[in-house]
Image (cartoon, helix red, strand yellow):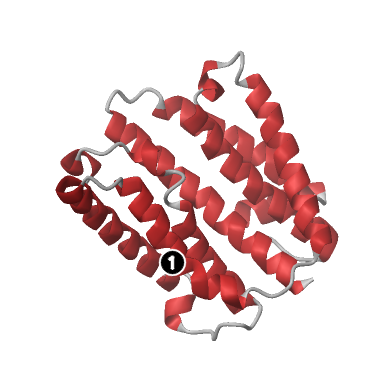
Amino acid sequence: MFRWIKKDPKDLFLPLIPFIFVGSGARALVDNGVYPLTLFLVTPGIYIIVGITAIITLLASVKLEEKFGWDYKRIIFLSGLLLSIPNIMHLKPFNLTPFFGILAIWVAFTLIFATLGLRWYLLNDRVNLAVLSAHLFDASTTFVAVDFYGYWEQHVLPTFLTNITNTAFVMFPLKILIILTVLYFIEGFEDKYVKNTLKISIFILGLAPGLRNFLSLCMAT
């Protein structure tokens, strides 16, 4: 698709964040009883709807850019913000303890790898750092939720490792190892469309659940 519209997926990391918030925010609001539990507001329904909407918005924004010269990235970002309004209006007050705790851990880990990126080509690429940072955010939310607020991990491997180590901190080495390995192999692709499509997909797979966990925990505690 990206080759057909002649747009590089790496330019969409920031513009797509509001769309990610639409899906993850809706799931968090369902978790906290604000939105009703319906087929279209749970996984995978909400993410399918948001994904289709994002693709349609992308195609429409490219056409608008061709016809009127409007920046397609700005159109996507503003469209996502508009769709985010219902979620924003229904957010419950945040507990600032997990809010700042998660952000502090995430920023600390991201800064460590940003510093490593000064000397390591793999993380010198801002796109690669963004992909890893998204998964570090997910790991931060899981660690705080499980270790400090009594939540539990839903996936088999993380649950197994958490039970063995008796801490969800294990999510950090697990995420770091997997994401860096995957990014290393992705760098071997010469086609930028394939390479960056894979990267933005992995970015979304990290940020979407992380943002849902973050919002759910901050509103529930």
Q: Position of residue 39 (x, y in %)?
A: 44, 81
45 w.r.t. 129: above or below: below
Q: What residue is shown with label 1?
A: 82
In the rendered view, does 168 fall on the left or right side of 139? right
Residue lying at 27% horizontally and 48% vertically, measured from the top left: 70
In the rendered view, does 129 fall on the left or right side of 170? left
Per the image, label 1 sits on a secondary structure element best described as helix
Question: Mark 1: which amino acid?
Answer: Leu
Q: Position of residue 112 (x, y in %)?
A: 71, 28
Q: Position of residue 109 (x, y in %)?
A: 71, 35
177 w.r.t. 220: above or below: above
203 w.r.t. 78: above or below: above
Q: How many marks?
A: 1
Quarter of image, res 95: bottom right
In the rendered view, does 175 fall on the left or right side of 8? right
Residue lying at 37% horizontally and 49% vertically, measured from the top left: 74
Residue at the top extreme of this rendering: 119
Give the class, few, some or many, for how many residues have Cα within 10 Å of label 1's Cα (few <14, many ≥20).
Answer: few
Q: Nearer the viewer, residue 177 or 107?
A: 107
Q: Nearer the viewer, residue 64 or 192?
A: 64
* The C terminus sits in image quarter: bottom right
Q: Position of residue 196 (x, y in %)?
A: 36, 35
In the rendered view, does 30 fall on the left or right side of 94? left
Q: Nearer the viewer, residue 87 or 172?
A: 87
Residue lying at 19% horizontally and 50% vertically, measured from the top left: 68
Residue lying at 42% horizontally and 78% vertically, measured from the top left: 40
